[in-house]
Image (cartoon, rainbow, N blue to C red):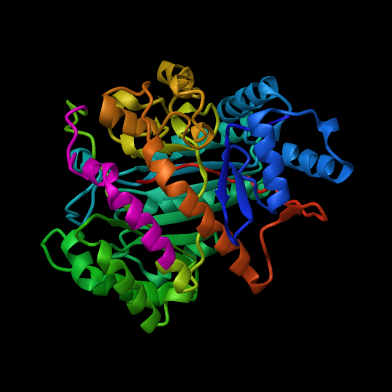
């Protein structure tokens, strides 16, 4: 037996002599005592047979093998990794069909970093295209055998064109109810046009949650996300959140850079003062990233200075600082260690449909037809989808890199930003090496604090308590 190359260790934590083992493919996390850690050290140096150990250690090693933390041999390691990537790419997800639908490319804000600046148009999803989308969704659901459909209405600003939200949701709800499926939808909005009457109406046809963008406290947000006329939007958004938060789940998603990062705790304090913080369903903040160039020249990347933030200590420090700020306030957080699956390399999985009915596999490429994978007027995908499926960037990664299952050779959008193509690796190993031990510690603390009674499972000579947690997350929004 041998320790998997995809196992990470944080030693002398949470106490001296103890260790946390974490597997980047299975996302299993387990606490080890000193004796078992020494056993794994021995496996790393000389390799052993299972029969070389006493009965209790054999049981522990079998448990660790189930988690992926140890493997029988190199052949098993390779087979598990190949099967993992095969499942990501081709294994049908019959549980949920997630679809993003843009009701328009138009927006009533003038965000200084707008991700869709080059594709903003007065284009609105009409009834004819809505019908085509409904037909495409139903055929796709029946063909792939999905048990549920979840639509995210997006933009531009989706509430500038509410008719398709109402029409598509009603039709899909009726079809789902008649065919034994589940249907729900969400709205991602800048929050300025929220109306309680709309929320009350949409709750009856499947509205699950509303996600609103806030980029810090009043001053910071108004600088980043003003109305078209330059006036501030913060107070309008807060008023609208207050009007609906007791009716539907509301989440907040913000973006940050060096200018507004320090305003986020002030926003959290303000939300708590307004009795909103712990009513919110989910809160998250992401770094501002570069965007594609003009429509006729997407490779002429704009806002490239954002990449410097990733390359230096900024991203490392900001990620840990924000997670600690969340935990200190008792805000629910997702695990920091996660598998981020690129939707471009998945045969199944979510899609995004723009107001013209053009289909994309990643929101970052919306509006650029050369990156589209089809149109709702056609049942299948185009040849671009097949070419994307043939991308196996991870095969170009160093064999000794333990982070390959987490990043799969890197985000394809970031590969385009850095390499001007979708196929090369986009290596962030140096960043992972710095941040993963700290994120593992924070995830351990998160697990032990949750419900005031849970703790991370331990494996020791006198104890076998196993918990395997696997969570696949697709990074679909920047």
Residue 321, how many percent across, how many down? 37, 62
Residue 469, how many percent across, how many down? 65, 48
Where's the N terminus, which quadrant?
top right
Q: Is residue 156 something that shows in the picture?
A: no
Residue at position x 39%, y 76% in the image:
243
Residue 65 inside the magenta-drawn segment? no
Q: Is residue 219 something that shows in the picture?
A: yes
Question: Where, by quadrant of the figure, is residue 89 drawn?
Answer: top right
Q: Which span of residues is magenta-colored?
A: 299-324
Q: Is residue 65 left or right of residue 183?
A: right
Residue 320 inside the magenta-drawn segment? yes
- Residue extending farthest to the right is 55
Main SS class of the magenta portion in the image: helix
Residue 222, how many percent across, how many down? 19, 66
Residue 14, how many percent across, how many down? 59, 61
Question: Where, by quadrant of the figure, is residue 88 drawn?
Answer: top right
- Residue extending farthest to the left is 229
Residue 191's place in the image compared with 268, above or below, is above
Residue 66's place in the image compared with 13, above or below, is above
Viewer-proximal residue among 442 and 238:
442
Count numbered badges in the picture: 0
Q: Is residue 55 left or right of residue 70?
A: right
Viewer-proximal residue among 264 and 437:
437
Q: Is residue 430 left or right of residue 395?
A: left
Residue at position x 40%, y 35% in the image:
429
Viewer-proximal residue among 193 and 124:
193
Residue 286's place in the image compared with 48, above or below, is below
Residue at position x 74%, y 36% in the image:
65
Q: Is residue 174 left or right of residue 273?
A: right
């Amino acid at each position: 037996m041998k320790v998997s190359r995809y196992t990470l260790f944080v030693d002398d934590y949470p106490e001296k002599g103890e260790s946390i083992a974490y597997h980047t493919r299975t996302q299993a996390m387990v606490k080890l005592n000193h004796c078992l850690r020494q056993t794994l050290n021995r496996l790393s140096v000389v390799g052993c047979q299972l029969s070389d150990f006493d009965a209790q250690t054999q049981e522990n090693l079998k448990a660790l093998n189930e988690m992926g933390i140890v493997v029988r041999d190199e052949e098993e390691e390779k087979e598990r990794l190949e099967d993992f990537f095969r499942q990501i790419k081709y294994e049908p997800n019959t549980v949920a069909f997630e679809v993003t639908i843009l009701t328009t490319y138009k927006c009533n804000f003038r965000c200084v970093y707008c991700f869709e600046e080059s594709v903003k148009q007065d284009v609105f999803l009409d009834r004819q295209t809505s019908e085509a989308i409904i037909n495409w969704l139903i055929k796709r659901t029946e063909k792939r055998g999905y048990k549920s459909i979840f639509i995210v209405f997006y933009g531009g600003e989706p509430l500038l064109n509410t008719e398709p939200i109402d029409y598509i949701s009603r039709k899909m709800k009726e079809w789902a109810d008649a065919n034994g499926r589940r249907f729900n939808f969400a709205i991602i909005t800048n929050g300025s046009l929220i109306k309680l009457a709309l929320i009350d109406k949409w709750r009856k046809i499947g509205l699950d949650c509303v996600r609103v963008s806030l980029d810090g406290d009043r001053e910071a947000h108004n600088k980043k996300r003003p109305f078209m006329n330059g006036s501030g939007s913060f107070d309008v958004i807060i008023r609208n959140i207050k009007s609906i938060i007791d009716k539907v789940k509301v989440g907040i998603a913000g973006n940050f850079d060096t200018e507004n990062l320090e305003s986020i705790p002030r926003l959290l304090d303000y939300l708590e003062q307004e009795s909103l913080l712990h009513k919110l369903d989910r809160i998250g903040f992401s770094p501002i990233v570069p965007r594609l160039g003009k429509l006729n020249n997407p490779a002429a990347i704009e806002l490239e200075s954002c990449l410097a933030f990733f390359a230096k200590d900024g991203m490392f420090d900001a990620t840990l600082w924000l997670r600690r700020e969340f935990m200190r306030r008792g805000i629910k957080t997702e695990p920091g260690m996660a598998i981020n699956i690129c939707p471009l390399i998945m045969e199944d999985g979510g899609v995004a449909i723009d107001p013209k009915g053009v289909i994309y596999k990643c929101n970052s490429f919306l509006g650029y037809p050369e990156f589209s994978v089809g149109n709702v007027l056609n049942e299948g995908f185009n040849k671009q989808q097949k070419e994307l499926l043939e991308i196996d960037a991870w095969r170009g990664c160093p064999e000794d890199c333990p982070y390959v299952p987490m990043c799969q050779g890197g985000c394809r959008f970031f590969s385009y930003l850095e390499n001007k193509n979708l196929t090369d690796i986009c290596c962030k190993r140096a960043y992972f090496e710095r941040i993963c031990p700290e994120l593992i510690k924070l995830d351990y603390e998160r697990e032990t604090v949750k419900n005031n009674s849970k703790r991370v499972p331990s494996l020791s000579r006198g104890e076998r308590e196993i918990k395997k947690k696997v969570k696949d997350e697709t990074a679909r929004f920047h």
